[in-house]
Amino acid sequence: MVEISVILPVYNSESYLRECLDSLTNQTFKDIEILCINDGSSDNSLKILEEYEKSDERITVINQENMGVAKTRNNALNMVNGRYVYFMDSDDYLDSNAFKKLYNNITSNDSEICILKAFFIKNGEKYKFPAFDLDKEFGGVNFNDFTFNYKDIKSHVLNDLFAPWLKLYSYEFLKSSDDFTFPQIKSYSDAPFHVKTFLQAQKISFVPEYLYFYRENDDSLVHSSSNTINFFTLSDIIENYLKDNNYFDEFRKEFEAFQAVKLVYYMGFADSDEYYTKAKSTLKSIDFENNSLILTKDADKANLIIDSDTLKEASLAIKLYDCNRKVKTLEESKSWKITKPLRKFTSSLK
């Protein structure tokens, strides 16, 4: 048995894969295994993986037809030999001391989940993710001797970064419930996994350091206009879980905020009437006046995050989107095109 098993799904990541693998193999904490699952890549990813496998006995390469990241992660969980599990993305990289610090924290606290902080990289610039600022919330505690559960960080269950690469998990904990799997949806499968594990963990701990480097990818499924409709499947999965396990009343406001944040964010690249109609209907059902949260924008990332008192900004956003759709419809109409010469003539008379 090893101490940490790394699950690394790989799909067409040749541009950044070496940097990712180097950050794993050069960790100061050495007692790891690295399960690299090539998920039907059509580039040179498999060749790179096999090269690293030959040079480091801790690396195991599994080659498969494309199954998607959710099924790949679920299958890999049945292959691990470690006491702890870490999920890595193949175009990102880690600080060389990441596993050492995570391992020391999770073992000293005997916790089931240990959270870290992350930078994101966009256009070559590095920014701090506005996520899990728990050091600010808990003050000057010794995080190597401090645990908490979801009740202490309630706003982070549904309204923070869901990514599994922000956490080191106890393998025993992950195998303790059939709930802890990634649902078979095209994207957003991180969110239900995050919500379920956070709600059921008795002891969560935290390393208040930026140890992960996330490379923003505008071509990812999350940013695909054709995939935005899948958000409603995700929302149903989470809502049903909260209701089936008697959490919904406790998290009603947080769930509404989760819906509003995501729906308004994905409108930025959604292009289907079906998405618009569903989003408008969902946002209309939210009590903006009495909700205890507000939508704001982070200046660096221009990404919607949670702040304080109401959700009025979401209501304004849906109205603005509605106006823009009407303008677009007008500009594409035959009458608008036919009258274009007349508008130019009228303008010249001014």
Image (cartoon, rainbow, N blue to C red):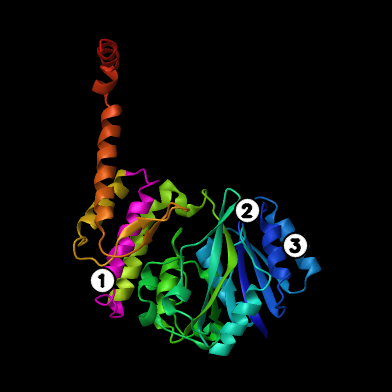
Q: Nearer the viewer, residue 333 or 162?
A: 162
Q: Which residues are magenta?
A: 244-272
Disc 2 to disc 3, how far (Cα)?
14 Å
Mark carried by residue 252: 1
Q: Secondary structure at mark 2?
A: loop
Q: Earlier in the sequence, mark 3 or mark 1?
A: 3
Residue 256 falls within the magenta-colored stretch: yes
Q: Kindly indicate the quadrant of the structure image that contains residue 212.
A: bottom right
Q: Secondary structure at mark 1?
A: helix
Indicate the position of residue 293 as horizontal and vertical percent values: 29, 65
Kind of residue indicated by mark 2: Asn
Disc 3 crowd, CA 10 A, few/some/many (<14, 14-19, 20+) = some
Q: Kindly indicate the quadrant of the structure image that contains residue 202.
A: bottom left
Please determine whether, in this image, residue 295 is positioned above or below residue 206.
Answer: above
Work out which quarter of the rendered image holds the C terminus and state it.
top left
Disc 3 to disc 1, how far (Cα)?
48 Å
Indicate the position of residue 137 as horizontal and vertical percent values: 42, 76
Which residue has dot 2 on it? 12
Please determine whether, in this image, residue 274 is positioned above or below residue 171.
Answer: above
Single out the residue that lies furthest toward the front: 140
Which residue has dot 3 on it? 50
Kind of residue indicated by mark 3: Glu
Kind of residue indicated by mark 1: Arg
Relative placement, left or right, of 227 versus 251 is right
Relative placement, left or right, of 243 versus 170 is left
Mark carried by residue 94: none
